[in-house]
Amino acid sequence: MKNPGHVCNRIIEFAFYALFFLTPLAFSPFNFELFEFNKMLVVYALTAVITGAWLIKIVLAKKVIFRRSFWDWPLVLFFLSQVISYLFSIDRQTSFWGYYSRFNGGLLSVISYLLLYWAFVSNINSRITYHVLRITLASAALVAAYGIAEHFGIDAQYWVQDVKNRVFSTLGQPNWLAAWLAALLPLGLAFAVNLELTTYNFKLKKVISYLFLVISFLCLWYTKSRSGLMAAAISVGVLVALQLAPRFKRFWPVTIVILAGVGLIGGKILWDRNRQDIRYVLGFTDKVEITPQMVNAGGSKSADIRKVVWRGAIDIWRHHPLFGTGPETFAYSYYWYRPREHNDLSEWDFLYNKAHNEYLNYAATTGTLGLVAYLILIGSFLVWSVKKVISCQLSVISSALAAGFTSIAVTNFFGFSVVPVSLLFFLFPAFAVTISDTKDEIRETKENPKIFASQRLISAGILLFTFYFLLLILKYWYADAQFSKAEKLGKAGQYNLAYGAASSTVSLRPFEPSYHDELGLDLAGLAALAQNDKTATLSAQLAKMAVEQSTQALKISPFNLNFWKNRIKIFYRLGEVDGQYYQQALATLLQAEQLAPTDPKIKYNLGLLYAQFGQTETAITTLEETVKLKPNYIDVRYALSLLYRQIGRKDEARQQLEEILRIDPQNQKIKDMLEKK
């Protein structure tokens, strides 16, 4: 009979192998979000398996199996900061599960990463750690190879994005892929130069290691991610520095002075060249140079987009300095302080659910407490690594882990962590701890232990709970697939089919507001169809149900602007059933305007509704305010020209048409209108 403790060890070991191999590769075409959702569920499922096996192992051993490490207290502090921010969150549903379509970053994901860290350091030795690292690089090689194939058009017909120009492989976005590969490149380099790690053929090892480096860097290059390439260069430099430093100890003071001088000079150059932008981001000035018209070739520069979003994030932090607005609530609170300059960007109507800077994102959503805790996490691992360097106790692989961790810190300044990157962020320190452990042991129960009935009962309970959690994950996946189906059918106007799919999502996960929101939209569509078929009673019943579902979505997530906008759509559709719903649409627009005072689309629709009610002067005033928010909004200027002409202000009407032609010189419709007049 096998030792049950040994079986648990093997389950934990192979679950970690699966975690690092499958997570980067996981994606599905059946879900609302193809990439992040599936990766997050893989993490949840394998965290449940690993934690369940670890708990059973503890029960069988009749003692707590927990290995202390330098990162324990930083992790506890970070976790407490997230819990406190969650308690003060403006939307606890989102703060726990994560923003729908992002998922990573919610309290549940943080709990999973912390459990994985402690499970790894408590149950895995250095030998298995090296196996995990090799499997991680094998997965990276497959991802990179697919990315290279993308560059040559293997799947170009399946994506709206120009994937041949900027590849994203199985991670879903070029910058995410670049951040992940940049963090792993130092590890691949370390394996290539650290020849004693393996016992198989030297030449074969050399070929495989350098092949990995070539395809990974080539794929990284094809992402065209400047932050990823910069992070890769920095991480390789850190790896070289960590390995050379112990050999030239007498040069440490000189090195520090040189690095400090370079930093000061670089900072001065950065300030001189970007003084206006930096002052704008920090809120010292309200003026910033942004092109008001969309650039035909590629839209606004990413730097222009970031500085506007960063300004909004800092404003959130200033108004909620201690605990923020709650984990993963940036998509809601950003609209409260969204800079007017956002409307001058080509992506002015995009929803930004992250600050595109992990540090500012933590500041905005979890406040100073969360940001400080996050910085302590980063700093404690880097300080620990430097101490190991000074004492000559840091191996090449450990140096590579520290270098890869530095790479993540760099890419997170220009973006945010996704599931594969977060996995590396929280587990790289665990790898370093186990590799540096000289005892090199796995704790397990003694041979042929005597297992009591109470131990069997508790173990069975843990096993049942683990299977139950896995079943919940499976239900979550199916619900999301149905949600994706309902959303697509609803947009296509097939409300009968969409209603069936949306109803199943609500029955599977009644606490998910997005599902209620979609069901409300589909019911409103059915109500309009029923009205057209002259079935007034059914139409009224469906209309009532639609409003109830929308109300339920907003009851769970009251600050989700998308739900307010969809509620407006519902009332517009139901206005065909009963004209009183237009009044409710107006009331909803006014509430949405309070949540997003600089959103020009809300003001535009508000102006149109005032015009529909015959309140022409109020409509004109509202549309004039909209023009101030977004001067190049053609639809608004066209509506204004019609209203001006309606009340006899023909010169102003013509002026609006001329302004449209200035914005869009090729607009033949406006040319014809001006010629006729």
Image (spheres, rainbow, N blue to C red):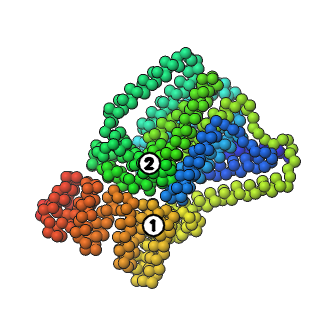
Report which residue position mark 2 lands on: 317
Q: Nearer the viewer, mark 1 or mark 2?
A: 2
Residue 428 shows up from this direction: yes
Residue 26 shows up from this direction: no
Q: Nearer the viewer, residue 239 or 386?
A: 386
Q: Nearer the viewer, residue 326 or 290?
A: 326
Q: Is residue 496 left or right of residue 455?
A: left
Q: Which mark is residue 294?
A: none
Residue type indicated by callout 1: Gly
User: Residue, x 38% and y 68% (percent of image)?
Assistant: 588
Give the x, y percent position of residue 354.
Answer: 45, 49
Provide the secondary structure element on which disc 2 rests.
helix
Give the x, y percent position of residue 498.
Answer: 49, 68
Q: Which mark is residue 490?
A: 1
Q: Nearer the viewer, residue 122 or 285?
A: 285
Q: Nearer the viewer, residue 216 or 540?
A: 540
